[in-house]
């Protein structure tokens, strides 16, 4: 229970008393132990071994070694003062081939983690899928085939059965746009295909998997809430010209309406599909399954782009182009636009009947200064990351503004607890509140960790 002093501090900085403060990670990015205790291979294990796919040929074989060092990470979360920890389950650690009997060692790992979090008063938020599809399913067609959705529902049922008495907040998928489009159309993520039809098929099957998993949760009567996490985009028009305003609307669909329209029972955006001459592989009853009611929507936000009208082409059928800006950039080359978070939250709240919103990821990659000793009496080290502190300050203030606007925003999760494997960028891009020494795997909190600790306590925006 939070103290009266902290509750008062939260009220004074514009956040409700019951606002949820958390931190987020994902399994492939931090766990390591890729071949231990019965874990099967994932599509990312295979993708990382294809030459040229990942920066400097790096992989998640060891990552942050959280499979072994999770007690250290739970201690960091406890010292940070978070209310909740959002982490994902590695499907191949639970079902090595994506179907069939479950792997008891894998289930026990997550049970230990959940129990340790609860013992510290930290609520576990479990994401069922954060991109590490079992390789056997990937080789059978992955998300381009309908069967994968049914295998996902079976896996989800296993996790509900194992942890449903202790875990009361579940998310089905994390950023399915990335799985479908970066994985199957742009070739930047596993499995590395470049085929639009495959991306659209994957979109439908991911949404079907989501709906089946929600239905499974509801039918079994588990106590708790379940939702979906997307990475929406509402690019801003480069000018006030009507053509650019319309282009910005079109630019938002693939990352936002393509997912939320079906989830909220509105079907797929017809203009988007028409521009591609595409039909989704919908069968009778699919759209009703996809529209199973959810309790909350998670929003992952990092940046906001600017767009202008452009001629439609087969490669870019929506008729827009990204344009340069004078805004500061993160190490990912992304614009730093705190008020873009306020805008995207407001757009979702106005457009779809969302019950509750959470910012489930927000953070920035910067090149941090090396750890250096501080005052002798603390016998600790410090990593200075002033740019990241400023990024968090601005974006958390934007959350406060969104709440003042009437957006039903209930919580915020910083990305990420640890510097970790950043997908195709390997370990070159650092998002963590805590640095991880690549040789020793020792954890060292950064200034942003201390800032976020103060923020959670109610003092960060003073």
Image (cartoon, rainbow, N blue to C red):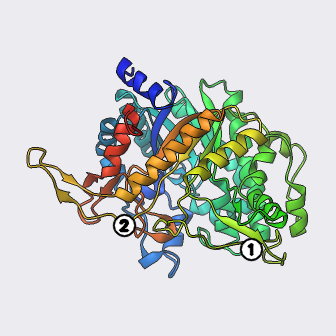
Residue 367 visible in the picture: yes
Asked whether 445 or 307 is in front, the reply is: 307
Q: For the N terminus, which image quadrant?
A: top left
In the displayed structure image, the side of residue 461 where residue 133 appears, left or right: right
Task: Judge whether residue 88 can be spotted in this image.
Answer: no
Residue 291 image-quadrant placement: top right
Pinpoint residue 204: horizontal percent, then vertical percent: 78, 55
Query: Circle 2 sits in a helix, a strand or a loop, which is it?
Result: loop
Q: Relative to the observer, which residue lies in front, 424 or 297? A: 297
The quarter in which the C terminus is drawn is top left
Image x and y of residue 140, in percent: 68, 64
Q: Which x, y percent locates residue 188? A: 60, 72
Residue 242, image quadrant: bottom right
Question: Residue 209: where, in percent of width, then height?
Answer: 71, 47
As displayed, is residue 41 above or below residue 38? Answer: below
**Residue at position x 53%, y 60% from top?**
336
Count neighbours of disc 2 (C-alpha within 10 A) and say few if under 14, some if 14 to 19, many if 20 or more.
some
- Which residue bears the numbered disc 1? 195
Which residue is depicted at the point 83% across and 61% down?
246
Q: Earlier in the sequence, mark 1 or mark 2?
A: 1
Spatial CA distance of label 1 from label 2 is: 34 Å
Question: Quick check: marks 1 and 2 in contact, CB under 8 Å?
Answer: no
Closer-to-camera residue (152/370): 370
Q: Residue at x 64, y 60 (%)?
A: 179
Q: Does dot 1 land on a helix, a strand or a loop?
A: loop
Q: Residue at x 67, y 27 (%)?
A: 220
360 relative position to 217: left or right: left
Indicate left or right for 67 with 401 as reference: left
Please indicate whether residue 371 sits to the left or right of residue 270 in the image: left
Of the numbered discs in the image, which one, if any, rests on residue 367?
Answer: 2
Q: Is residue 314 above or below residue 9?
A: below
């Amino acid at each position: 229970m939070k103290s009266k002093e902290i509750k008062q501090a939260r009220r004074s900085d514009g956040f409700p008393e019951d606002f949820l403060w958390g931190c987020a990670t994902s399994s492939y990015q931090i766990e390591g132990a890729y071949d231990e205790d019965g874990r099967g291979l994932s599509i990312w294990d295979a993708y990382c071994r294809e030459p040229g796919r990942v920066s400097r040929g790096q992989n998640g074989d060891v990552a942050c070694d959280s499979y072994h060092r999770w007690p250290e990470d739970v201690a960091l979360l406890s010292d940070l003062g978070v209310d909740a920890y959002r982490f994902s389950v590695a499907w191949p650690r639970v079902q090595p081939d994506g179907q069939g009997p479950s792997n008891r060692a894998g289930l026990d790992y997550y049970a230990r983690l959940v129990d340790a979090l609860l013992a510290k008063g930290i609520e576990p938020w479990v994401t069922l899928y954060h991109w590490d599809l079992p390789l056997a399913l990937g080789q059978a067609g992955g998300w381009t085939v309908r069967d994968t959705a049914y295998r996902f529902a079976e896996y989800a049922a296993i996790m509900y059965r194992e942890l449903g008495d202790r875990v009361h907040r579940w998310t089905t998928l994390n950023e399915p746009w990335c799985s479908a489009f970066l994985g199957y159309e742009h070739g930047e993520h596993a499995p590395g295909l470049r085929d639009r039809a495959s991306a659209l098929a994957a979109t439908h099957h991911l949404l079907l998997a989501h709906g089946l998993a929600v239905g499974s949760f509801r039918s079994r009567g588990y106590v708790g809430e379940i939702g979906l996490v997307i990475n929406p985009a509402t690019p801003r028009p480069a000018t006030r010209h009507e053509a650019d305003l319309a282009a910005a609307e079109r630019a938002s669909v693939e990352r936002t309406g393509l997912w939320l329209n079906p989830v909220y029972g509105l079907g797929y955006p017809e203009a988007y599909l028409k521009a591609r001459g595409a039909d989704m592989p919908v069968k009778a009853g699919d759209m009703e399954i996809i529209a199973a009611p959810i309790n909350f929507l998670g929003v992952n936000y990092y940046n906001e782009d600017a767009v202008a009208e452009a001629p439609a082409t087969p490669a870019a059928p929506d008729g827009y182009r990204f344009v340069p800006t004078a805004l500061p950039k993160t190490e990912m080359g992304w614009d730093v636009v705190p008020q873009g978070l306020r805008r995207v939250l407001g757009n979702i709240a106005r457009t779809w009947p969302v019950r509750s919103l959470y910012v489930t990821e927000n953070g920035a990659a910067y090149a941090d200064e090396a750890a250096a000793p501080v005052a002798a009496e603390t016998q600790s080290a410090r990593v200075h990351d002033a740019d990241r502190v400023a990024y968090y300050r601005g974006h958390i203030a934007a959350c406060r503004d969104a709440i003042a606007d009437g957006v039903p925003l209930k919580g915020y999760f910083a990305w990420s607890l640890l510097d970790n494997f950043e997908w195709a960028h390997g370990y070159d891009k650092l998002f963590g509140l805590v640095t991880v020494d690549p040789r020793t795997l020792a954890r060292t909190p950064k200034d942003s960790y201390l800032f976020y600790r103060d923020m959670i306590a109610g003092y960060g925006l003073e």
